[in-house]
Amino acid sequence: MSQFKSAEEAAAAGKYVRTVRSFVKREGRLTKGQATAIERLWPTLGLTLDSGRLDLAQVFHRKAPVTLEIGFGMGHSLVEMAANAPERDFIGIEVHEPGVGACLMAVEEAGIDNLRVFHEDAVEVLKQCIPDKSLNCVQIFFPDPWHKKRHHKRRIVQPEFLSLLTQKLESGGIIHLATDWENYAEHMLEVLNEASDLSNLSASGDYVPRPESRPKTKFERRGEGKGHGVWDLQFQVK
């Protein structure tokens, strides 16, 4: 923590010191194309914690509904969603640098201008950069299930994190989750059902059919070929 003995001491000196992240940035080997895309496109499409609280209308040069995706992987489905919904704006958060590079390459290939990306920890982005009641939708698709019971506490979908998400959503906003681990789906459903400020959009009170707006990934298709299930949940802010 450099010259400061605690986060409180740093804050008193007007300095920000990061606390424990929800997960650690995973740096991988960038391809030449990914590295070039980051170098060329980051100045216009990249967002950082240093930006502070964002004015989303200023970021996108217009006022439109905003979807935030946490953990977009290589970004292919996120870019497809943005291309299919030009009337909406999208923000993606990913800690894996090659994924950020791949996403930027896909954005350029698609020729779209309604997507921005963070290479940061989602909790810090939400706390520092996203204004309250500014998002129309938050989506988390196929997060790490931490399938061993002793690791369940590491799952990103927990009551405290859900409270933070809800705080950033406008009234009527949607939380859309998807997983191919049934145990995690059950955990997600339990956490979401306990939130008094959310209502389940499932007609059966549990899961919803995959919305057409969520593209199937290669990973998902491969899993379906092996007989794996996928569970989608959609809850709305009251």
Image (cartoon, grey):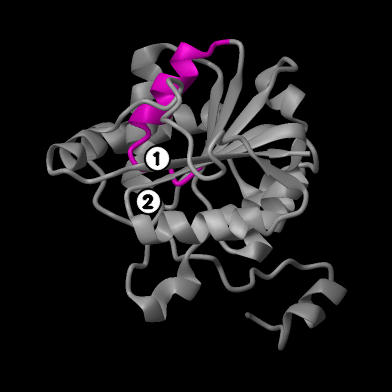
Q: Nearer the viewer, residue 186 or 138?
A: 186
Q: Residue furthest left?
A: 226
Residue appearing at x 45%, y 46% in the figure: 71
Identify which amino acid the numbered label 2 is placed on: His
- Could you tell me if the residues under marks 2 and 1 are in contact, i.e. CB atoms within 8 Å? yes
Q: Compared with residue 169, is residue 188 higher up or lower down, i.e. above or below?
A: below
Q: Toward which corner of the image does residue 224 lie, by quadrant?
A: top left
Return the x and y of residue 164 as percentages of the image width and height.
Answer: 71, 55
Q: Quadrant of the C terminus?
A: top right
- Whether residue 182 appears in this view of the structure is yes
Return the x and y of residue 68 as percentages of the image width and height.
Answer: 58, 36
Identify which amino acid the numbered label 1 is placed on: Val
Residue appearing at x 77%, y 48% in the figure: 197
- Whether residue 52 appears in this view of the structure is no
Badge 2 is on which residue? 96
Q: Describe residue 33's horizontal placement relative to residue 209 as left or right.
A: left
Q: Describe residue 31's horizontal placement relative to residue 103 as left or right.
A: left
Return the x and y of residue 228 as percentages of the image width and height.
Answer: 22, 46
Return the x and y of residue 69 as percentages of the image width and height.
Answer: 52, 39
Q: Nearer the viewer, residue 189 or 21?
A: 189
Residue appearing at x 68%, y 70% in the figure: 17
Q: Nearer the viewer, residue 63 or 200?
A: 200
Label 2 environment density (alpha carbons within 10 Å; few <14, some 14–19, many ≥20): many
Q: What range of the chain is rendered magenta?
A: 70-86
Cα distance, mark 2 to mark 1? 7 Å
Q: Nearer the viewer, residue 1 or 102?
A: 102
Q: Residue furthest front?
A: 204
- Which label number is shown at residue 100? 1
What secondary structure is found at the residue carrying circle 1? helix
Residue appearing at x 75%, y 31% in the figure: 172
| Number of numbered callouts drawn | 2
